[in-house]
Amino acid sequence: MHVSLSSKNRQGPPRNFMKKPIRLICLSLALLCNSVGAEEKTFSIDALVKEILQHNPTLLTSKRSLDVATAGVTTAGARPNPRIEGNAGRQSAFSASGQGAVTGIGVAQLFENPALRSARIDAAQSIERGSLQTVAATKNEVVAKVRLSAFDYLLRKEELLAATDALSLLEQIQQRVKVKVDSGEAGKYELIKADTEIITARQREQTAKLQVEQAVLNLNRLAAGKLPPSWTLDANLADAIELESLESIKTIALKSNPELSVLQADVERAQARINEAIASRWPGVDLRYTHQREPEARQNILSLSIQVPLVDQRTGPRNEAIADRERALTRLDGRRNELQQQLALAWSSVEVARLRIKALDEGAMRGAEAALRIAQAAYRYGERGILDVLDAERVLRSVRSDLLLARYELQSSTIELDFLAGRYVNAVN
């Protein structure tokens, strides 16, 4: 039997038959692009510092202040503009020939006292130097904050790893306890105790995760939110540290600390203000040329005027500048003394941290690990209870936490020394 199908009854492929593979290909490409775009970026600490310095709002604001101070130097060096005067009127006289229009034009120029102008420029330049040192001090502080926050991030990650390891160990202990309880070799109390420890360990792990997220947010805040969505840090809390002697660091700090440079610029600015106040008693010479035309005559007049300091000797501004200089000198001397004490304190913190690390790493950590192994073996053979194992695990966790904190304190104290010495001003360009 032959069956004939018309075009209306003939069934072909659905209209979206070819569209589905295309959609799947597009979706796969989109997922691939997202996975490539979300690839985690790895920073060294120096690279992270450089990235944050490009966006840190505090440093950028400080640089804008330097632009203002630079413009102030141009303002201080500007010379006064000449003045042009004009007048017009009518002259009346008893005789007809003496009547008519009167016109005049004049030009005046102030020739400023060179000492006054020089003192004003010196004051503006000292402000510019102070602003430049303020930028350096801001950069020094921001770099120290970034490095400290970076090591805080590493500390939180190490704490998270320790919490995860502790949780994994407790879960293994729980399984062993459960086997013993099910076989009747141990009481149910031991299982309850192990379950309680696991709950506490999970809470510690969650807290550690939140602290890692907070450390990331803190670093991103310093970068004004410009860090990549996903990144990691290629550094370790146990990275080696090389330090010079305390006396050498003090010498460098007294020479390079940007805070001292800012205060020194304040002293120079106050001295320039004193010179400016003294020179302002004689502000300059005012030279004037006038040409006047009358109906019967023409007059060309050249006049010169000068301010004589008979009443105002500029005593007030001079005394204000002297007091300001003395205050700046006091602040400078006080900061020098304070800086030396801070350096000594940071150095002692470094020594204490080194001793703690040595004692914990070489002694307490090994002892705690050995004690836990012994307690676990004794528990397997029925010689010890679960409480002994949990106590040994708790001691190991405490020693590990102390070791991490000691390493962080060593890094933070070293950062404090470098910050006080002003090493971060040119550390990353």
Image (cartoon, rainbow, N blue to C red):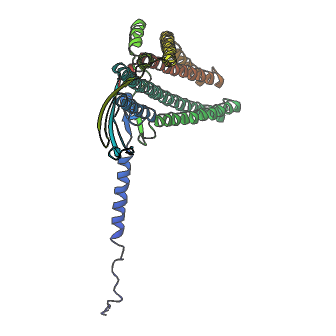
Q: Is residue 65 above or below residue 133?
A: below
Which is nearer the eye, 383 or 406?
Answer: 406
Which picture quadrant has residue 414? top left
Q: Residue 302 in the image: x percent, y percent?
A: 31, 29
Q: Residue 342 in the image: x percent, y percent?
A: 50, 13
- Image quadrant holding the C terminus, namely top left
- Image quadrant holding the N terminus, namely bottom left
Q: Is residue 46 above or below residue 415?
A: below
Q: Is residue 30 visible?
A: yes
Which is nearer the eye, 285 or 421?
Answer: 285
- Say whether residue 180 is left or right of residue 116: right
Which is nearer the eye, 273 or 396?
Answer: 273
Residue at 33 percent of width and 86 percent of height:
10
Q: Residue 365 in the image: x percent, y percent?
A: 52, 17
Which picture quadrant has residue 294? top left
Q: Is residue 343 visible?
A: no
Residue at 44 percent of width and 23 percent of height:
237
Q: Residue 72 in the image: x percent, y percent?
A: 39, 30
Q: Is residue 239 above or below residue 206?
A: above
